[in-house]
Amino acid sequence: MAPRTIVLMRHGEKTGEAGDRGLSPAGRARAERLATWIPEAFGRPDFLIAAADSPKSRRSNLTLEPLARATDVTIDDAVENADFKILAARLLGDPRYTGKFVVVAWHQGKLPKLANALGAPAGSYPDKWGRETFDRILRLDYGEGGAPRVEEMRQPF
């Protein structure tokens, strides 16, 4: 009872300005390019999931907004960044995700832990997501039972 594919990625680039919760011009440009590239590379997503907005960041939501508009898929942002285990349990246990394609935009510090909670085998994903790494994607493909096959990719822009 797992999705067909989960794509994990970090939100777009920050502005670097104290207290700014948004994306930099580079982050906004990345989000716009993802709206075209993800459907071309993987197909239309069935679900879009972003870390919940917080007093420090709206970046996960802002990264997925152009993709949501392009695909007419609503962003689910009900789970807090620190509650990645809740998200993983939901994705792997709720039948509505079975066989579906899910795109997740999250925060860099929790992405390796989220991959682990989604069953990715140790060593198949980076232990740390670099502070300046915004173009990495993890593709988790779930087959019949067992751990997903993990492919680390780079956004081509």
Image: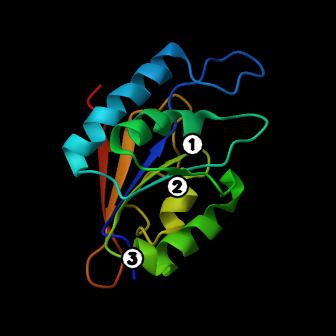
Is the residue 105 above or below the residue 78 in the image? above
What color scheme is it? Answer: rainbow
Closer to the observer: label 3 or label 1?
3
- Mark 1: few/some/many CA within 10 Å (<14, 14-19, 20+): some
Is the residue 21 above or below the residue 107 in the image? above
- Name the residue carrying label 3: 2
Q: Earlier in the sequence, mark 3 or mark 1?
A: 3
Going by the numbered disc 3, the residue's amino acid type is: Ala
Q: CA distance from mark 1 to mark 2?
A: 8 Å
**Front position in the image: 131 or 43:** 43
Please indicate whether residue 41 sits to the left or right of residue 102 in the image: left
Going by the numbered disc 2, the residue's amino acid type is: Pro
| Residue at 41% from the left image edge and 20% from the top image edge | 29
Closer to the observer: label 3 or label 2?
3
Q: CA distance from mark 3 to mark 2?
A: 19 Å
> Among all residues in the image, which is located at the extreme left?
40
Question: Where's residue 78, x and y in %?
Answer: 65, 57
Question: Where's residue 117, x and y in %?
Answer: 54, 69
- Name the residue carrying label 2: 112
**Front position in the image: 147 or 144:** 144
Question: Where's residue 5, x and y in %?
Answer: 32, 63
- Mark 3: few/some/many CA within 10 Å (<14, 14-19, 20+): many
**Front position in the image: 43 or 124:** 43
Q: Which secondary structure lies at badge 3? A: loop
Position of the N terminus, as image quadrant, is bottom left
Question: Where's residue 74, x and y in %?
Answer: 48, 50
Position of the C terminus, as image quadrant, is top left
Q: Which secondary structure lies at badge 1? A: loop
| Residue at 28% from the left image edge and 34% from the top image edge | 36
